[in-house]
Image (cartoon, coloured by chain):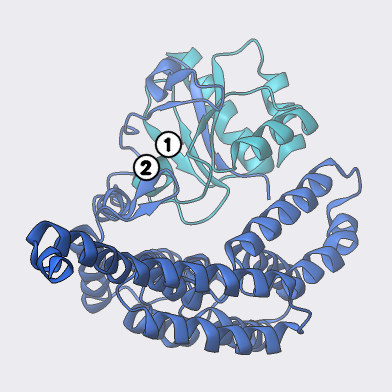
Amino acid sequence: MKWVKRLSDPILLVLLLLPSVLVTGCSKEERASAELNAIEEAYAETELGRDERLAEFTLRYEALAEKYAGTGAALEAESWLLRGTSLDEEDDATAELAAIEEAYAESDLERSEKEAEFMPQYEALAEEYWGTNAALEAKLWVMSRTTRGLDDEEEASMVGEYTDAIFERYARSPHAEQLGQLASSFTEEQRDQYFGELRETSPHASVRAAVIYGQAWYKKAFMRYGQVEDTPETREEIEADLELLVEEYADVPRGTSTYGVMADALLNAYTDEELGIGQPAPEIVGVTADGEEIRLSDFLGKVTVIDFWGDW
Amino acid sequence: MYPHERSLVSRLEDEAFALVGVNSDPKEDYFEAIEREDITWPSFWDGGDTDGPISTKWGVFGWPTIYILDHEGIIRDKDKRGEKMDEVVDRLLAEMRGG
């Protein structure tokens, strides 16, 4: 029969099969992407409260990541799951925080009055966008103001409460990188406890590097001021952590630099002897905030006070 | 800090004296501070936070940290503030003039 004969025609056969090959080859990505879009839309429109929303959408993203494992959409779902926030929320929170910071910078009030005035705004932002990077930044702002001036014991206990709440939400988040700065507020015990956990369990190299650096930096700082005993063991611990950063986290960015560069600088910092009284001050080559190059040696011939300062 | 440093700088305006900062603020905070506090002396800008390369290399862990150098660039004193800073600076200026 003519039809049968046509069917056996190899070219026709390929043409007949091609659409189904295309459908099965592409459609997994396409279906995954369509489902991801649907979840994202539902998330943007949901009226669920903060915690219910997180619970509900965690389930939906988990289901998608499992069902479409290997697709781009599944990767996006996994990255959502680590944050528990949408990228739109992150952007909104960042923009709102920037607006608060701008108003804060323009306020003419005294610092303490200004802080009291803006505290509710920082708190509200942290509450509304809890989980985002900006919310964590706002929370840390609030924490540093509410614990300032307390006696050591009260401070440690309040810092612990804040940190427990933060860890509950941020322990697996890439935003936990910010927690490296908590080193200055922690007691030595808290530092070992919280940072020890993060450096073992965080899935993000940027977070692990931040806490390793934080631990090393503060041990070194506290050793200088006598709050940590200067022993060969402590020095070895600091060195081992900094070397770990140089070896395994060298390219992880930090601000405008990298952990490799910063750990190396800390490893090779001038010793107390090199900066001792009677020693020639080492040269500093740098730039002003206006971008003009300056050197410490520009001031030779003058009695010079070097003042490491910040406006805080 | 600021009022004392301002008065030191203006008192020694015509002397062989320099106050040089190493600033750890984000740029916008730095510009805001120099305007608000009428800061006339220059500063190295250390990248915007306390982990900057200059502070790190110099092992600075607390702010402010002060070094006082004589006119030959030798470290002569550290962490003297207020009147004590004035005394050291005046002594070093006198020493320099005395030859």
Chain identity of mark 1: B
Task: Indicate the position of residue A139 as horizontal and vertical percent values.
Answer: 69, 71
**Which circle marks residue B76 in the picture?**
1
Q: What residue type is labelled 1?
A: Arg
Q: Do labels 1 and 2 share a chain?
A: no
- Which corner quadrant of the image does residue A311 belong to? top right
Q: In this view, does A148 lie to the left or right of A268?
A: right
Among the chains, which one is cyan? B
Task: Indicate the position of residue A12 as horizontal and vertical percent values.
Answer: 16, 59
Identify the residue at image location x=63%, y=42%: B84
Q: In this view, does A286 lie to the left or right of A1?
A: right
**Which circle marks residue A136 in the picture?**
none
Q: Nearer the viewer, residue B33 or A180?
A: A180
Does residue A219 appear in the picture of this structure?
Answer: no
Q: Disc 2 marks which residue? A: A277
Which element type, helix, strand or loop, lies under badge 2?
loop
- Which corner quadrant of the image does residue B42 belong to? top right
Task: Name above or below for residue A146 compared with residue A96.
Answer: below
Q: Residues within 10 Å of mark 2 (few under 14, many from 20)?
A: some
Q: Colour of chain A?
A: blue
Identify the residue at image location x=76%, y=84%: A48
Task: Name above or below for residue A18 compared with residue A281.
Answer: below
Task: Point out the residue furthest to the front here.
Answer: A1
Q: What residue type is labelled 2?
A: Ile
Task: Name above or below for residue A146 compared with residue A248.
Answer: below
Q: Which of A54 and A233 is in front in this view?
A: A54
The residues bearing labels 1 and 2 have C-alpha atoms spaced at a distance of 5 Å
Identify the residue at image location x=37%, y=65%: A72
Cβ atoms under marks 1 and 2 closer than 8 Å: yes
Task: Indicate the position of residue A274 as horizontal and vertical percent values.
Answer: 28, 44
